[in-house]
Image (cartoon, rainbow, N blue to C red):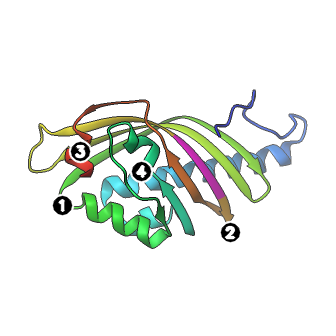
Amino acid sequence: MYVTRDRALAAPGHDSAAAVAELRDRAEITDALYRFGLGQDLKDQELFASAFAVDAELDFRPAAAKWGAEPPLMSGRDTIVGTILAMFTGRVDTTHQVTNVRISVDGDTARLTALVEAQHLLIAERTRHALLKNPYDVELVRDGDRWVIRRLVIDNTWFVGEPHAIFG
């Protein structure tokens, strides 16, 4: 589930070429998650979509279960992008902060674990918000020189505010 290796790089310290290649992959893998967060925050459909594989899945069910909601599994890049941006654009401002990134690369697939703090504020009622602290479990695939999310599972450690007001 989560990346719990006892070191950051798998490449041996004496193999500079392998270390540089792995560092490039790790930067691109992390960037996929940054595109996910910033694409939402800016309501930028192109940037947000660039984070996902065409056949991606986004599973928000573990997080939503913490406040009693039962959203569906979202399948397909177009469904994910359309659903999330339609839910937030013009109604909810968001900010996402990503930390504690851990990555494991295996050829053309990778796994990423991160802790994401997501603030959601209703545009019309700034006092109504939901602040979520969410562990992310992400499976990624190589897409040329970049990486994209194939499967993203979002859990929730804690929240404050009114998630029902934000997510429905």
Q: Main secondary structure of the magenta part?
A: strand
Instruction: Select label 3 or label 1 by which is in front.
Output: 3
CA gap, disc 1 and disc 4: 17 Å
CA gap, disc 2 and disc 4: 21 Å
Q: Which residue is mark 1?
A: 90
**Location of residue 154 with respect to 35 vertically, above or below:** above
State the count of labels: 4
Earlier in the chain: of badge 2 and badge 4, it is 4
Question: What residue appears at the point 62 percent right and 44 percent down from the top-left corner?
Answer: 112
CB under 8 Å between callouts 1 and 4? no
Residue 41 position in % (x across, y down): 32, 52
Residue 103 position in % (x across, y down): 67, 41
Residue 30 position in % (x across, y down): 58, 47
Q: Which residue is mark 3?
A: 164
CA gap, disc 3 and disc 4: 20 Å
Earlier in the chain: of badge 3 and badge 4, it is 4
Q: Which residue is mark 2?
A: 144
Q: Which residue is situated farthest in the left direction here? A: 124
Residue 135 position in % (x across, y down): 50, 37
Residue 147 sits inside the magenta stretch: no
Which amino acid is tagged 2?
Gly
CA gap, disc 2 and disc 3: 39 Å
User: What residue range appears in magenta?
Assistant: 136-140
Which amino acid is tagged 3?
His
Tell me, yes or no, if residue 37 can be seen here: yes
